[in-house]
Amino acid sequence: MLDSMLMRYIPALQGVVLAHDRLQFLDKVATIKADCPFAICKVAFDATVWSPQVGMKLAGKINLCSPDHISLLVHRTFNVSIPRHHITTEEYEFEYGPADNDPEFGAQHTEQNPAAEGAEGQVEGGGRWLHKVTGTKLGDADGYLEFTVIGLTIANQMLSLVGSIQPDPFSPAHIPKAPTTTATKAGQQPPSRPDTVMLSEKEVDALIEEGQDSDDEHDTFRHLGKLADQAEAEARRKLEAAEEAARKERKRKRRESRAQDGAADAEDVLGEKKGKRKKKS
């Protein structure tokens, strides 16, 4: 079972198990629980775990460059991705590599320059990031680049990292913003939204189609969410008003019944007094 954990991210250990040793049983007997076909006992072992944390500074070797990100390998095993908004684009710019079918920089160029091949035997033809002033390649002479860990990605028990080479990697300025466009023309007022709370199916379909045609679909759904909240608040207000009216009606009926009971009691008292007067006469 421990062998099956090797090179996998184990949440209980908060890292990737690289090796285990000195296995020993802590109990002399095993426990059988209910219908479980396995005997359960406690064990102890030493494990070597690779457990990177957010904020750590690590170094990886660049194996792929593109305009959108930089891919690295840490310890020649673990994948790291540095997105574009975490690359210092003020200092570096991306330079596209030669095309494979280019007769000037194609296969002949690769044969004449064996150093163009990476350490893993792959030709570096996708491009590279160069300094805008000095023209030096991003990273050191061996292709290693230091970065700051800003995120962990776990998928299928495999761990990969998200890095940054910005001086302040956790600054809100490095959060990518979605492009916003204006659908209205100059001098034209934006279409007003209906003030009604309840919408018909046609109006809802029209709003959804309008949201699909625009570049920012979230505005339509946000508006629908607001209308739904308004409808819920309106329904809640009507329900409270109905309950208040029902309470007032019940109070009024109780007062009327009490008044009728009091009038009936007064009539009974008057009747008794009249009967006594007749007897005396």
Image: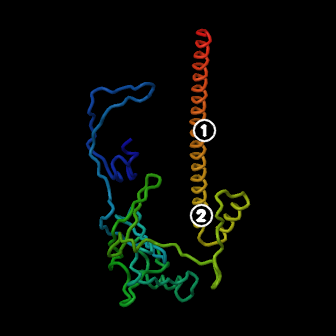
Please give the label number shown on residue 223: 2
Vertical side of 86 occupied by 162: above or below: above
Of the numbered discs 1 and 2, the one sitting upstream in the chain is 2
Regarding residue 121, the answer to whether it shows in the image is no
Tags 1 and 2 touching, CB below 8 Å: no
How is this picture coloured?
rainbow
> Toward which corner of the image does residue 253 lie, by quadrant?
top right
Looking at the picture, which amino acid does disc 1 mark?
Glu
Horizontal and vertical percent for residue 270? 59, 20
Looking at the picture, which amino acid does disc 2 mark?
His
**Position of 167 compared to 111: left or right?**
left
**Position of 210 compared to 91: left or right?**
right
Quarter of the image with the C terminus is top right
Residue sitting nearer the eye, 277 or 37: 277
- The residue at the point 67 percent across, 65 percent down is 207
In the picture of the structure, the residue carrying the numbered disc 1 is 249
Regarding residue 225, the answer to whether it shows in the image is yes
> Toward which corner of the image does residue 40 lie, by quadrant?
top left
SS at mark 2 in the image? helix
- The residue at the point 41 percent across, 64 percent down is 79
Residue sitting nearer the eye, 48 or 52: 52
**Position of 125 compared to 139: left or right?**
right
Vertical side of 166 occupied by 225: above or below: above
Name the residue at the top extreme: 279
Residue sitting nearer the eye, 33 or 229: 229
